[in-house]
Amino acid sequence: MEPDARVVQKILNNLKEGFGISVKPHGDTKLLRIEWLNLYNMPEDLKAIAQLFSYWIFNLGYKPQAITSIETSGAKYGVATSLFAHLPYFSLHKVSKLIFEEPIAIESRSITEDRALKLFGDKSVIQKYKSVVLIDDIRRTSHTIDSAIELIERCGSDVEGVFVVLDFKFAKHPYPKKVDQRNFHALFEIENVKQTGECEVNKGLALSYLEKVSVL
């Protein structure tokens, strides 16, 4: 089932119009509070985003054995994508679990949470899947994405590609170092954002999809 172009267009409009978006100053930078992305989800939005990920994973030629994401606000997109892609799913965690057979950890830093961050996984699970696609909600500094990839690679698995809902290009941070830039993909690339929340979005796989189905 292909993504509903009407819903994809609505999400794009919400970004451009600043619907449910507020800007939070944080030192020399700014954070975006996008309530319908991070704090709650409408079923049709979650479905459309997951279908977009699934659509492009296969249309771009990726052949992952599993989908993974970090147990944060982006995890729901990974789980939903695995359902539409008909692929297994495993999580990377922010805390270790007593049930892990082979716990493995790596240190990172979260700008959104303003603290040092450790990522944990169970090597006995991760190593079952030799190729995976990593799904996340936002790319800002790329630290968390790089740490997630390093954790997976330490388990002997390979991250074929990384997909995010939003790429905060306005933050001007470098792309992830652990994945070839050609294998990093965003549904919506945010080039700029006004203090009132309106986002400038001119590129991204979501827009490519809308062009393909002649909605834009």
Image (cartoon, rainbow, N blue to C red):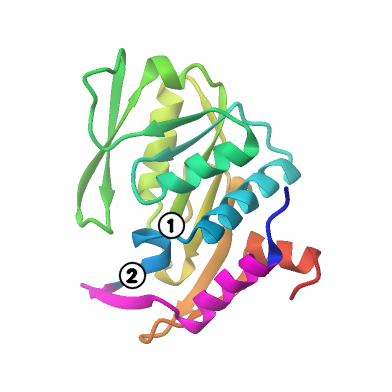
Relative image position of residue 46 (x, y in whole percent):
52, 55
Relative image position of residue 98 (x, y in whole percent):
21, 19
Relative image position of residue 205 (x, y in whole percent):
65, 59
Q: How many marks?
A: 2
Relative image position of residue 178 (x, y in whole percent):
48, 40
Residue 161, visible in the rendered structure: no
**Callout 1: 10 Å neighbours few (<14), some, many (20+)?**
many
Disc 2 marks which amino acid? Arg
**Callout 2: 10 Å neighbours few (<14), some, many (20+)?**
some
Residue with the mark numbered 1: 138
Residue with the mark numbered 2: 33
Placement of 198 over or under 152, stated as above or below: below
Instruction: Residue at 41%, 49% (x, y): give it.
Output: 74
Left or right: 94, with 88 as reference point: left
**Labels 1 and 2: the sequence-earlier one:** 2
Give the distance between the C-alpha atoms of the residues marked 1 and 2, in whole angstroms: 12 Å
Tag on residue 194? none
Would residue 46 be counted in the magenta stretch?
no
Left or right: 100, with 213 as reference point: left
Q: Secondary structure at mark 2?
A: strand
Quarter of the figure with residue 145: top left
Report the span colored magenta: 6-29
Instruction: Residue at 30%, 12% (x, y): give it.
Output: 101
Q: Nearer the viewer, residue 143 or 21?
A: 21
Residue 21, visible in the rendered structure: yes
Placement of 103 over or under 43, stated as above or below: above
Quarter of the image for the C terminus: give it.
bottom right
Left or right: 36, with 93 as reference point: right
Instruction: Residue at 41%, 42% (x, y): give it.
Output: 146
Instruction: Residue at 81%, 70% (x, y): give it.
Output: 214
